[in-house]
Amino acid sequence: MRYLLRIVELTLLILLIAVTVQNSHVVEFRLFFGQQLSAPLIVFLLVFFVAGAVIGLAATFGYYLKMRRELSQLKKELRSRPAGERIPDPSDALAD
């Protein structure tokens, strides 16, 4: 299985290098007020891919923090119940 994964990774690397070589032409990226940047197309593709990934992670991070805060609040509420009403917390078994 490990060798199969390495073969797939090597194949993807070769394909990405081929795409990079095919898109090495210099292009102009026009900004506001007549400004422009010139760079190979693959550089712009990489920059926008990374920017999209960072924005996606930032959006997900806010949701993650909200869910974590809600989970800790619910655990506190569960632990504060009287012993008769108390239901064992299944996530506590994972911590052991």
Image (spheres, rainbow, N blue to C red):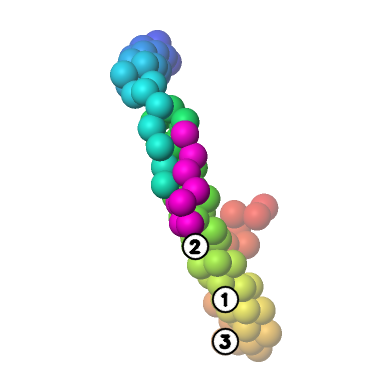
Could you tell which of marks 3 and 2 lies nearer the N-terminus?
2
Q: Label 3 belongs to which residue?
A: 85
Q: Closer to the camera, 26 or 9?
A: 26
User: Magenta residues, as a range?
Assistant: 31-38
Please tell me whether residue 42 belongs to the stretch shown in magenta: no
Q: Closer to the camera, 25 or 23?
A: 25
Q: In the image, is residue 66 above or below residue 48?
A: below
Q: Amino acid at mark 2?
A: Ala
Tell me the distance, in whole angstroms, between the alpha carbons under discs 3 and 1: 21 Å
Which residue corresponds to the image point at 61% horizontal and 73% vertical from the top-left? Answer: 69
Could you tell which of marks 3 and 1 lies nearer the N-terminus?
1
User: Label 1 near label 3: C-beta < 8 Å?
Assistant: no
The quarter of the picture where residue 80 lies is bottom right
Q: Label 2 belongs to which residue?
A: 59
**Seen in the image, is 13 located left or right of residue 64?**
left
Q: Position of residue 48 (x, y in %)?
A: 44, 44
Q: In the image, is residue 9 above or below residue 94?
A: above
Q: Amino acid at mark 1?
A: Glu
Tell me the distance, in whole angstroms, between the alpha carbons under discs 3 and 2: 38 Å
The quarter of the picture where residue 10 lies is top left
Q: Label 1 belongs to which residue?
A: 70
How would you rate the neighbour count of disc 3 (Cα within 10 Å): few for under 14, some for 14-19, many for 20 or more? few
Residue 5 in sight here? no
**Seen in the image, is 69 located left or right of residue 30?**
right
Q: Position of residue 17 (x, y in %)?
A: 39, 17
Tell me the distance, in whole angstroms, between the alpha carbons under discs 1 and 2: 17 Å
Which residue corresponds to the image point at 59% horizontal and 54% vertical from the top-left? Answer: 94
Which residue corresponds to the image point at 57% horizontal and 76% vertical from the top-left? Answer: 70
**Seen in the image, is 84 located left or right of residue 37?**
right
Which residue corresponds to the image point at 37% horizontal and 23% vertical from the top-left? Answer: 25
Q: Secondary structure at mark 2?
A: helix
